[in-house]
Image: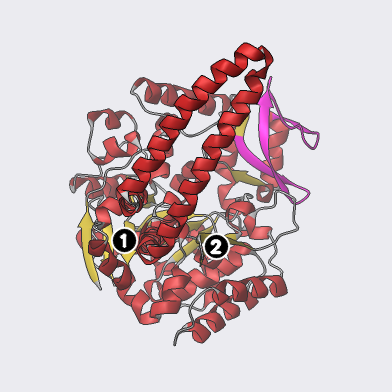
Amino acid sequence: MQLTELSIRSQNLFIRDYIEEKKEMTAFFDYDIHSEHTWKKRYDDLMEMSFPREALADYMSAYHAKFESAAMRQNIEKIRDERSVMVVGGQQAGLLAGPLYTIHKIISIIQFAKEKESALGVPVIPVFWVAGEDHDVDEINFVYTSGEKGPVKQKLPLHNVKKTAAKRTPLHQEKTEKWLRDVFSTYEESAYTNDLLDQLLRCLRKSQTFTDFFEWIVCDLFEEDGLLLFNSGDLGVKPLERTLFKHIVETNDAVTARLNETQAAMKRAGYQPIIEAGDNQANLFYEYDEERFLIEKENGQFSISEVGLTWTKEELLQEIEEHPERFSNNVVTRPLMQETLLPTLAFMAGHGEVNYWGELKGIFEHFELKMVPVLPRLHVTILERHIDKKLPVRELSVEEVLTNGVKEKKEAHFEQSLPDSFVQAVDQAKRELANVHGVLRQEALKVEPNFEQLLDKNAKFIEDQLQFVYQKVAQRVEEKEGYILRDFERIENSLKPLDAPQERIWNIMYFLNKYGPEFFKTFKNLPFSFQNKQQIVKL
């Protein structure tokens, strides 16, 4: 296994300027992630703050007991140490651990925590924030597998039409097992297939919900690393969140105003905000009849019109006091909850997350909080040996494929494969027939001016017949050149499937099935660098 790096600029202007240290970024973040002094400064700032360490450790201890992990228990006890801090990142609870970027984010969290623990000489705990309260289950109930014509979405059928949080969305054991076996039927059987499938079935049988299944798989993959899981949808954590829920309600208008101000500043600087938050949003969700609804505000009242619920501010504060388990954060307030509960040294973010954290600068100032250093996670591409060998044969580089895909090279090769004489003959036939039909058109219209539509149809028919001949010849050439075109398709499907980064489409199980558990142990411990470069792992 070999690790190399590539410099590939992001297409997102905001993240590009953030990585390239443009001065405009100072308006949206409190810390300079490019300075090594930042981490000591952030640590000192955290030591001036107070966190519910004992209550948090007690809760985490109870939540993680089911995993029976010594490494987890050790890190939970570190929470009680006033010197300890955390590296945090999060994601939705995708099936089979979700797309590869979830794995890459977890590796980022663990490796950066180890790096800073060594540099600062204090306990640094890796924490993964599981978005268990997220109700967009359609975003996580599938994986992609390889089909004849590229990636195929393997969707787990659900009959739950309610907006239920992932933490409380049940997994039907028999249907999920069938789905899992269907996924594995698309893999080539290897020496590792049966053990991996058995391992996943054991995880499934210990799971009642989407987040359970996700957490058991992640725990298995990273058992020795002491990764802690913070499930935002778990009811046991809600009493710890009560105070901030109240603060958000009490200062709701200010939260909205500060968000609008920061987004306006971002637009003036030439950037595009991504948070869509209306002036009437209260930035909290409420669970009613097992569904999750966004609370709205208007004229001093808070309401959920879909179900006819209305509160005054005082009534809503009382509801939070009595039933904090009914409330959850939205994209605006989740980072605030993280910052008030967890002593976060660094937040490990995807590119889109960097953008939306920048939009929250004014809200952090309103709550008299410094925004955690937001560090772009590792971006990794796994380059399999058979793909690596095909690249030079097809005159492609990894950088070229990751940046532009293979479509242009593939089409250029195909066009070169068609005989020039044939292409010229088709073009000449089109021109000559167009001229002949033009003369015919003039004469016909002299006889009957109403033949305009008929003549258009006739011209189109002649053109279609020429195109039919062209396509038949092209199809035969493609059949003869099929193995070459399939090379392009294999390269594309591996490195840039569906014109997206590999890590957004493929799942770690494909690689675990093919290369086994030792591959993963080596992979997750590679000496990745946090220099905002594309990490290329050659197998």
Residue drawn at 60 percent across, 79 percent down: 201
Mark 1, other Cα within 10 Å: few <14 / some 14–19 / many ≥20: many
Q: CA distance from mark 1 to mark 2?
A: 29 Å
Identify residue for label 2: 143
Q: Position of residue 124 (x, y in %)?
A: 32, 61
Using the image, determine if residue 92 lies above or below residue 220: above
Q: Amino acid at mark 2?
A: Val
Residue 242 lies in the magenta-colored region = no
Q: Amino acid at mark 1?
A: Ala
Magenta residues (range): 283-312
Q: Nearer the viewer, residue 327 or 536?
A: 536
Mark 2, secondary structure of its residue: strand
Give the foreground label among 1 and 2.
2
Using the image, determine if residue 497 lies above or below residue 307: below
Q: Residue 113 bears which disc, if any?
A: 1
Are dots 1 and 2 in contact, CB under 8 Å?
Answer: no
